[in-house]
Amino acid sequence: MAHCAESHAGVDATTMSGAVINEVQKVVSREMPVDDGAIITIGTIHGGKATNIICPRS
């Protein structure tokens, strides 16, 4: 866990989750034929409730 004042000291799982979502989208948009109708759904990402703490896991 990292405090926002020392964000370099921790891992930001929410940012990493966003990168994974972008890569998953590429599978659908770049690898699947248009007429296959592929859909991938990622429901929610929970990053905690504290406003000054960087979430270490999602």
Image (cartoon, rainbow, N blue to C red):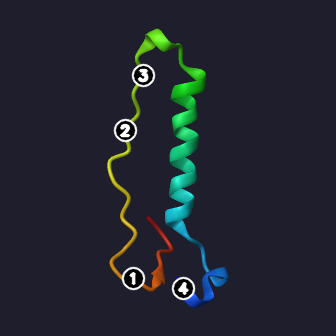
Q: How crowded is mark 2: few (under 14 residues within 10 Å), some or many (20 or more)?
A: few
User: What residue does disc 4 label?
Assistant: 4
Q: Marks 1 and 2, Cα distance to the nearest angstrom?
A: 27 Å
Could you say where residue 30 lies in the image, as x and y percent from the top left? Answer: 60, 25
Could you say where residue 43 lies in the image, as x and y percent from the top left? Answer: 32, 47
Q: What residue type is labelled 1?
A: Thr
Q: Do the residues labelled 2 and 3 touch (CB within 8 Å)?
A: no
Q: Marks 2 and 3, Cα distance to the nearest angstrom?
A: 10 Å
Q: What element carries label 4?
A: helix
> Mark 4 vs mark 1: which is more N-terminal?
4
Mark 4 vs mark 3, foreground winner is: 4
Q: Identify the residue at the far top of this view.
A: 35
User: What residue does disc 3 label?
Assistant: 38
Q: Establish if 3 lies above or below 57.
A: below
User: What residue does disc 2 label?
Assistant: 41
Q: Residues within 10 Å of mark 4 (few under 14, many from 20)?
A: few
Instruction: Tell me which residue sits at (40%, 17%) in the image.
Output: 37
